[in-house]
Amino acid sequence: MMKGARPYAGHPMVTREKGRQNRYQAVCGLYAHELGHVLYTDFLAPQTQLNFLGRGLWYPEPPALRTFAEFGNEKALWAYVKADEKNQEAVQTVAHTILNVLEDGYVENRMLLHFPGTLGFALEAVRARQQNEMPTVTQMKEAEEDGRCHILDSILQC
């Protein structure tokens, strides 16, 4: 997951690399990720989703609720959203964060499929670095317990 719109050369993923070639790879990989958004992201969909959630509606369509518990959970969600504006903002933030995680994977996979050369190779290298630096579930749980991260961060990391 790429965070922030920093200039590539100053991104920590680049600055901690040793050697010009490794830094070049990191810059190309970050560029490939962002180019994937330019080429494949529907920028109106997330805003539409947030607007719908703000009005207590699903977008693009309601989920298929199959059990009594699912219907009850949906009712509880909308009651929570309507109870306080901060609750609504929290639900919108969680929805946007989940969408961003899925969108990042989608655009990267499209880039790897359509640009297997330099951009794809660099993007694969960035993904490998991220995988190697990813904390373990145990480390995430410890971070939750001492307040360094929220359980949602752990869930999204998994």
Image (tube, helix red, strand yellow):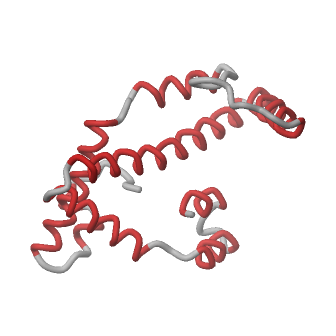
Quadrant of the snapshot with the C terminus: bottom right
Position of residue 121 relative to residue 105, above or below, is below
In the image as oriented, which residue stretches furthest toward the left? 20
In the image as oriented, which residue stretches furthest toward the right? 68
Would you identify the image quadrant in which residue 80 lies?
A: top right
Position of residue 2 relative to residue 22, above or below, is above
Q: Between residues 139 and 39, which one lies in front from this camera angle?
A: 39
Would you identify the image quadrant in which residue 27 lies?
A: bottom left
Quadrant of the snapshot with the N terminus: bottom left
Q: Position of residue 43 (x, y in %)?
A: 38, 29
Q: Position of residue 114 (x, y in %)?
A: 23, 46
Tally of numbered tags? 0
Left/right of residue 149 with respect to residue 65 in the rendered view: left
For the point 63% across and 56% down, the residue is 152
Left/right of residue 63 with respect to residue 23 in the rendered view: right
For the point 68% across and 36% down, the residue is 86
Would you identify the image quadrant in which residue 93 lies?
A: top right
Q: Position of residue 142 (x, y in %)?
A: 65, 77
For the point 56% across and 22% down, the residue is 51
Left/right of residue 20 with respect to residue 89 in the rendered view: left
Q: Position of residue 132 (x, y in %)?
A: 40, 76
For the point 19% across and 50% down, the residue is 115
